[in-house]
Image (cartoon, rainbow, N blue to C red):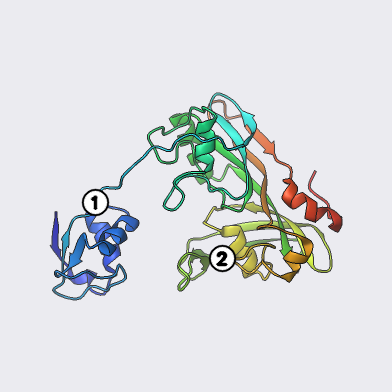
Amino acid sequence: MLNFAARSEEVGERVDVVLAKRAGVTRTLAQRALKDGEVTVSGKMVRPSYRLEGGDRIEGEVPEPVFERPEGEDIPVAIRYEDDDVLVVSKPPGIVTHPGRGHEAGTLVNALLGLGMKLSGEESIRPGIVHRLDKDTSGLLVVAKTDAAAESLIAAIKGRSVERRYLALVRGAPSASSGTIEAPVGRHPVRRRQMAVVSGGKPSVTHYRVLGRTEEVTLLEVSLETGRTHQIRVHLAHLGLPVLGDATYGGRSELSARLGIPRTFLHAHHLAFPQPTTGARIEVTDPLPEDLATPLAPLNLPLPE
């Protein structure tokens, strides 16, 4: 049971932030406990955004999260590479990578478990997962089969020895044939479900090169140096080049409809990483899925070899 007074340095801070730190739980759990009235401030229910005042006392208990291991499901997923340590899959568009709030089933993890795959972190809610793709983004993900492989891949991602390249069709054209976007990415100050380029955000670096263009659109190959949530979509929109079909960051437009683009035109087409046991360089490519290849074909834009 929690029962503590706000410290002087905590006055003015959000109660959910303080509760998460003092109780040693995630901010999501802290927010849920406040919303459900499991934790109160000076005997009253408050919103997670409440700013603490001098003399405030936080009381209550943050319930433990209920964990249910994901179940296998019959969801088609293509395997592009496999060995004893890892597999590389092509994530279909429209499904999230792993279970979470609002997505308890129907995820890539459920699909992999449905194939009978042995994955790292078997008691985790996201076994095998070391990086993610957005729901509407298709393409390559490397999945760890063992805990040792997971540790190796996570270290490789942090050490920037994993190469991730994407194909993106954007509205407009950059001023140069290639370039680098360096701009911090963080939570949008108002629309909290969105990300944005904000001061105080996490350092984020995206590289791009032009593959081809028309009067209205440009096909880019984009590579990540960092991997922030929605990074490519946010960075390109920040440059005035929204990804076509992206309703969240300004890319769903009359142009997208006219070209027949059904979703965010972003596909992870190339993945390279060190094999966890041998260190050998593994390179995998994935062709554009039909739902993006079909509207692209009439534009006669070149794809990378």
Q: Tag count in the figure?
A: 2
In this rendered view, identify the residue nearer to me: 114 or 231.
114
Position in image of residue 253 (x %, y %)? 70, 69
In this rendered view, identify the residue nearer to me: 17 or 41.
41
Q: Mark 2 or mark 1, which is nearer to you?
A: 1
Q: Mark 1: give few (<14), some (14-19) or many (20+) Cα within 10 Å.
A: few
The answer to whether one can see residue 171 in this image is: no
Looking at the image, residue 241 sits to the left or right of residue 101; the answer is: right
Q: Residue at x 48, y 69 (%)?
A: 188
Looking at the image, residue 150 sits to the left or right of residue 138; the answer is: left
In this rendered view, identify the residue nearer to me: 17 or 223.
17
Q: Residue at x 59, y 64 (%)?
A: 234
Quadrant of the rendered structure where residue 257 is?
bottom right
For the N terminus, the image quarter is bottom left
Outermost residue on the top side: it is 84
Position in image of residue 146 (x %, y %)? 47, 29
Quadrant of the rendered structure where residue 140 is?
top right
Position in image of residue 19 (x %, y %)? 25, 61
Looking at the image, residue 5 sits to the left or right of residue 239; the answer is: left
Query: Up-down: is 270 above or below 72?
Result: below
Q: Secondary structure at mark 2?
A: loop
Residue where numbered disc 2 is placed: 183
Marks 2 and 1, the one that precedes in the sequence? 1
Q: Residue at x 67, y 50 (%)?
A: 267
Marks 2 and 1, Cα distance to the nearest angstrom? 38 Å
Looking at the image, residue 289 sits to the left or right of residue 191; the answer is: right
**Residue type highlighted by circle 2:** Ala
For the C terminus, the image quarter is top right
Numbered badge on residue 63: 1
In this rendered view, identify the residue nearer to me: 91 or 262.
262
Q: Residue at x 47, y 35 (%)?
A: 150
Q: Secondary structure at mark 1?
A: loop
